[in-house]
Amino acid sequence: MMPELGKYAATVLSAYGISLVLLAGLIAFSLWRSVRVRRALAEQEARMQRHD
Amino acid sequence: MSIWEYANPKRFMQTSGALLPWVSIAAVILTVAGLVWGFFFTPDDYRQGSTVKIIYLHVPSAMMAINIWIMMLVTSIIWLVRRHHVSALAAKAAAPIGLTMTLIALVTGAFWGQPMWGTWWAWDPRLTAFLILFLFYLGYIALWEAIESPDGAADLTSILCIVGSVFALLSRYAVLFWNQGLHQGASLSMDKREHVADVFWLPLLVSIAGFVLGFVALMLLRTRTEIRSRRLRALEARERMS
Amino acid sequence: MIALLLRDLRLSVRSGGGFGLGLAFFLLVATLVPFGVGAEAAVLSRIASGILWVGALLACLLSLDRIFALDHEDGSLDLLATAPIPLEGVAAVKAAAHWIVTGLPLTLIAPVLGVLLSLPGAGYAPLVLSLLLGTPALSAIGTFGAALTVGVRRGGLLMSLLVLPLYVPTLIFGAEVARRGAAGLDNSTALLMLGGITAGTMALLPFASAAAIRAGLR
């Protein structure tokens, strides 16, 4: 399945590797922050409802 | 029904929440399709060998790096003129995506330049302009982080974005004057003779579409996070007051 | 506005530091570079104009946070914001005062440092000319950077990050004027561009600075 990359294999693979790692990092960070903020907001709203 | 209705955070949350899964799925499919098509099913270039495969990452990320800055400029102006919070938060949400795109364009460019030009880096106008763009993104994000008051930060970063755009454009032409480059001309052009051959062109288009949708999906997600975090801070403040 | 200019000048001279420090820094850069790249006159004379431009730029950067920081601390910036003169005028005066205490002395001392760096004889006039024409732009841009970070505590590093990318076009054209002049080439295009940048920044950036101060004080 792997295409023949010839003498530039290392170059092409590392370019793809680093880019995909960067993209994955950005996506993971965005998702992680989204989940965290969403949970904190839910907790806060629940707590304030109890107080009312 | 006008676009300004989405300036209402509640309205924005509803619509973006409904839209987000579909945009994300489409973005993943198109990006993966474009990259897989480009990586596995395109021939090597007769001069550049297999390094030509880097184009499917390099060109879309470079395009996005510039377009995201332009989008931030537009939303910054909207914030300054019409004071819609969603607009300011969208600019804030977009900046780290733009930073990552600039970094990807620089890194893939370095890997591509190493075998083709014999150097990782050259002070070529395009490369230099991207490095400067990277610095602008860094400064913009740092200013957002540094200022406590949310509205003040939105104001100041918007002003920085507008002034920075003028200077980024100026730098672009200044570096053109300063040094002649190695970089080839436009890869994308409506003129058939100019742009890359069809076998590379089609997967590249798919990949670009994937990157654009991916940016939209990430931006929606991050803007939603920013809106929630703003609401969280407001609730916390209210709790402390009572 | 003239009163404000005189007040700023007097303050910066009297409070010490700012006035001489930039010059000392400039001198240090010019002294340190030969240690770094070697004392070969041929190498030095080729890079002298560039080094002097970068050094002047850094010396300028060093003194930027004083533009608004002191006024912000003792509250006089709030007074200026409500004063009858427009805030845009205040920003322009601040930039002018900064130029007089920093840019102008740097320009005047640059030829002396050119001797240290074995600048070729043809290079002195273009160097002084380019600095004279370019440093007002550095002050105007720097005032904008200082205005952006006026409310930030310990904003010095942040301000450098914001201001340095904005300095790029000025540096490119300024150094190009000096370099081409030293090499005996035609430098009129770069000179015109440098003049254009200076005129543009002096005319327009005070508005951006004033907007930033208003946003920062709110």
Image (cartoon, coloured by chain):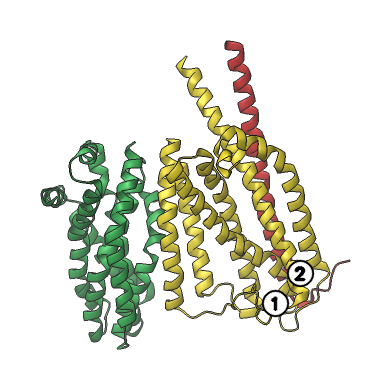
Q: Circle 1: is it few (<14), some (14-19), or many (20+) Cα within 10 Å?
A: some
Chain C representation colour: green
Q: What residue lies at 79% left-to-right and 73% top-to-bottom?
A: A5
- In the displayed structure, C134 sits above or below A47; it is below
Label 1 marks a residue whose chain is: B
Q: Which chain is yellow?
A: B
Q: What residue lies at 64% left-to-right and 74% top-to-bottom?
A: B189
Chain A representation colour: red
Q: Circle 2 sits on which residue? A: B202
Amino acid under label 2? Leu
Q: Which mark is residue C6?
A: none
Q: Circle 2: is it few (<14), some (14-19), or many (20+) Cα within 10 Å?
A: some
- In the image, taking residue B127 as reference, residue C86 lies left or right, namely left
Amino acid under label 1? Val
Q: What residue lies at 52% left-to-right and 45% top-to-bottom?
A: B92
Q: What residue lies at 58% left-to-right and 16% top-to-bottom?
A: A48
- In the displayed structure, C78 sits above or below C179; it is above
Residue C136 image point, x, y percent: 25, 63
Residue C60 can be seen in this image: no
Q: Which mark is residue B196?
A: 1
